[in-house]
Image (cartoon, grey):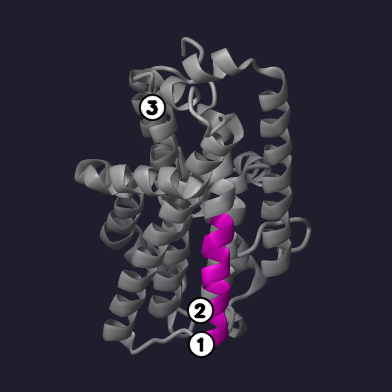
Amino acid sequence: MISILVKRHIVLYFSNKMRVIFSILGALIGYGLYFLFLRDNLLEAFTSLPDANQILDLWMMGGVLATAAISTTLSAVSRFVYDRERQVMADLLLTEVGLWRLQFSYFLSATLIGVLMQVLISFLSLTTLYLQYQLLLSLPQLLILFLAICLTSLVCSLMAMLLLYFIKKSSTLEVLGNIVGTLAGFLTGSYISIGVLPLVAQKVLTYTPAIYLSSLYRQIFLDNRFDGLTQSMREFLGIGVNWQHLTTIREDAIVLVIIAILISIILILINKFVKKGVMADGLSL
């Protein structure tokens, strides 16, 4: 039954072409701002860095993937709200599917959609980099990248489930989606370099999941290119989160796993104490 529901959610997501495009709009804006404004300024700032153009393009790709992870999973989980608003969820809960399996189907479909969309963006971006620089990632990098895509999709799907849990109206969802899509670009450092922000803002970002998403991706892409990057350069670009030392790939991944566990516990507790009827009808948000 879960597989049927997951297939339904995925088919409905991809059947709405405009929703698919808008779900990656934040990532596309990030690329646009980078090539129109950021790239030249960053190249001037890092003239002493060998292969600066390649490094900065890979750096930007990390931010774009992190933004896409947030926006695509949020858009996918929005099916949860649409079904509740149209009373589809209430009808499904009258069947043998059950509340837990129904919720899990929304989560799983969002995770799979996040993986698919990020794999597509990665393929297109890496193909462009190869055509421009003949640049290829190593097989271990590609494997770690895929694992990171799965992890970030899972974490972002959980965050989206928690964020949309009590939202009832699609109008509220659309406003929230616009806010999150815009914020994601800033929080991941796609629209502006982390080092440009005031120190207070940089400190605040270390407590948000988004910065660990982009840091993880950027470290994977630039794993064999750290020789030319000083610690101050890495800190300015957000390649590692400043914990008095810059985080490693493993530390970023561990933070994301901890976030996933905490959100899962919160969702389980909410399910335990919220009545089934409230779950089906939602709150007036």
> Which mark is on residue 190?
none
Mark 3 or mark 1: which is in front? 3
Residue 164 drawn above or below residue 135 = above
Task: Name the residue at 23% across, 45% down.
Answer: 15
Q: Which mark is residue 142?
A: 2
Residue 272, position in %: x, y? 72, 24
Question: Counting other residues with Cα less than 10 Å from the Cα at mark 2, is it few (<14), some (14-19), or many (20 or more)?
Answer: some
Amino acid marked by disc 2: Leu
Regarding mark 2 in the picture, which secondary structure is present there?
helix
The magenta segment:
139-152
C-alpha span from label 3 to label 2 = 36 Å
Considering the numbered disc 3 on the image, is that residue within a helix, a strand or a loop? helix
For label 1, the crowd category at 10 Å Cα-Cα, with few meaning under 14, some 14 to 19 and many 20 or more, is few
Q: Dot 3: few (<14), some (14–19), or many (≥20) neighbours within 10 Å? A: some
Image point 52% across, 87% down: which residue? 139
**Residue 239 located left or right of residue 87:** right
Whether residues under marks 3 and 1 lie with C-beta atoms below 8 angstroms apart, the answer is: no
Q: Which residue is mark 3?
A: 83
Toward the viewer: 37 or 262? 262
Q: Give whichever of discs 3 and 1 has the lower sequence position.
A: 3
Under mark 3, the amino acid is Asp
Q: Residue at x 44, y 51 (%)?
A: 67
- Residue 171 seen in render: yes
Q: Which residue is identified by label 1?
A: 138
**Cα–Cα span, label 2 and label 1:** 6 Å
